[in-house]
Structures are given as C-alpha cells and as structure tokens.
Amino acid sequence: MDLFSSMSIKNILPYDGTTIYHGVILDTSQCDFYYKALFNTIHWKNDEAIIFGKRIITKRKVAWYGDAEYSYTYSKITKKAMIWTPELLALKKNVEKESNETYNSCLLNLYHSGEEGMAYHSDDEKMLTKNGAIASLSLGAERKFSFKHKENKQRIDIILERGSLLVMKEATQTNWMHRLPPTKKVNAPRINLTFRTIEL
C-alpha cells in the first residue's frame, strides 16, 4: 500500500494510467458556500443498482446533471440528466480551467457519513469517452480514496481533502479500479462531484 500526500501535483499511479491529484483548489469560504448550496438545491435521490438480479437501494444519494438530458447507465440502472444549476456551472468552469479538460456532465454523490462508501469499480461504461478525463471534486468531510490494479492488485491510497481535485484519465479506468472505503472515524457528510464526458 502506498499513501500519497498533496504536497505537489503528480501522477499518483506508478504505471498503467494517469491520475493527477491537484490538491485543494477551493478556499474555505468557497467550500462552505458550494457545499451548502449543493446540499440544499441538488435533486438528490438514493442510488439504485441491480446486483445478481436484485434491485438494491443505497443510503448514498446521487444526482446526474449535464448540458442536455443525457441518459447514463451503470449497475444496470439508467438515469436521465438534469440541466446544470448556476453553482454546478461555476464549479464546472473552475474544474475545466484547473484540469485543462472539458466536460458535458456530472454525477454527484452525497455520503451522509463515513459509514457510506463505494465498492471497487471502474468508470468504463460505453457511453463515456474512452480514456477520457473524469474530474473528482470533494466537498465536506475528508475521506480516503483507494486504487487497486486489476492484474497485480497493487493498492494506492490517497486522502481527498476538502476542496480538492483528482483527475483520472488515459488508461486509468482500463487498468485500475477505485473505491471510497467506509470508515467509522468520519461522522460528517461528503459531497463528491465527478465531471465527465458522455459520447453523443
């Protein structure tokens, strides 16, 4: 296991992919403003998944926004995007400038406490641009984020700070899985925005 700090912008993966941790890109007042705005105005819904033929409802809540009413399917559930809110558009502009990439959609996740997480997976659905950038912006509680190589199982851990940006691109989704491990040490909520590009 390797644990990276945010002292400098670097590719945190040793091979087979590029994932850049930009560190904190929003100051404290921006974090407070956007966290409150998103918590109160986003149309949150409990996430759903089909696992072994059974529909599962998660405690974690999600929302899907974009340039148009894009359809997005993962875990055998299809979602239709809502149109950007002003706050999401402002964050999108900021993230695009910092990452030097463009995005047409965003999947948001609301974790109410550290006990809510996400299992290992890759964001490699066919409707996403292959090897395209996925920018993850974190608000609220700091959480550990883990990568695991699909072949040799090497693990990389990083602490995603409040207001920080992580950009996964190139062969990352092909060769690595990632997860948000649950923890009882975190009691505060976290909002995660994952900006991405849907192929039209």
Image: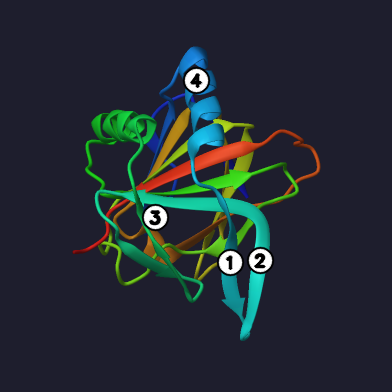
- Number of the front mark, 3 or 1: 1
Identify the secondary structure beneath mark 4. helix
The 10 Å Cα crowd at callout 2, few under 14, some 14 to 19, many 20 or more, is few
Q: Amino acid at mark 2?
A: Ile
Residue at (59, 51) in percent of width and height: 61
Instruction: Choose the circle earlier in sequence order: 3 or 2.
Output: 3
Identify the secondary structure beneath mark 1. strand
Residue at (33, 41) in percent of width and height: 84
Measuring from the top left, give residue 23's x and y in whole percent.
45, 28
- CA distance separating discs 3 and 2: 35 Å
Q: Identify the image quadrant of the C terminus.
A: bottom left
* Tag 3 near tag 2, CB within 8 Å: no
Task: Work out whether residue 59 or residue 27 is closer to the camera in this orientation and state it.
Answer: 59
Task: Work out whether residue 69 or residue 142 is closer to the camera in this orientation and state it.
Answer: 69
Tag 3 residue: 15
Disc number for residue 57: 2
**153 to the left or right of 95:** right
* Tag 3 near tag 1, CB within 8 Å: no
Q: Amino acid at mark 1?
A: Glu
Tag 1 residue: 48
Measuring from the top left, give residue 97's x and y in whole percent.
24, 30
* Tag 4 near tag 1, CB within 8 Å: no
Tag 4 residue: 33
23 to 133, vertically: above or below: above
- CA distance separating discs 2 and 4: 29 Å
Task: Work out whether residue 180 or residue 111 is closer to the camera in this orientation and state it.
Answer: 111
Residue at (63, 42) in percent of width and height: 144
- CA distance separating discs 3 and 1: 33 Å
- CA distance separating discs 4 and 1: 29 Å
Instruction: Choose the circle earlier in sequence order: 1 or 2.
Output: 1
Instruction: Choose the circle earlier in sequence order: 4 or 3.
Output: 3
**118 to the left or right of 124:** right
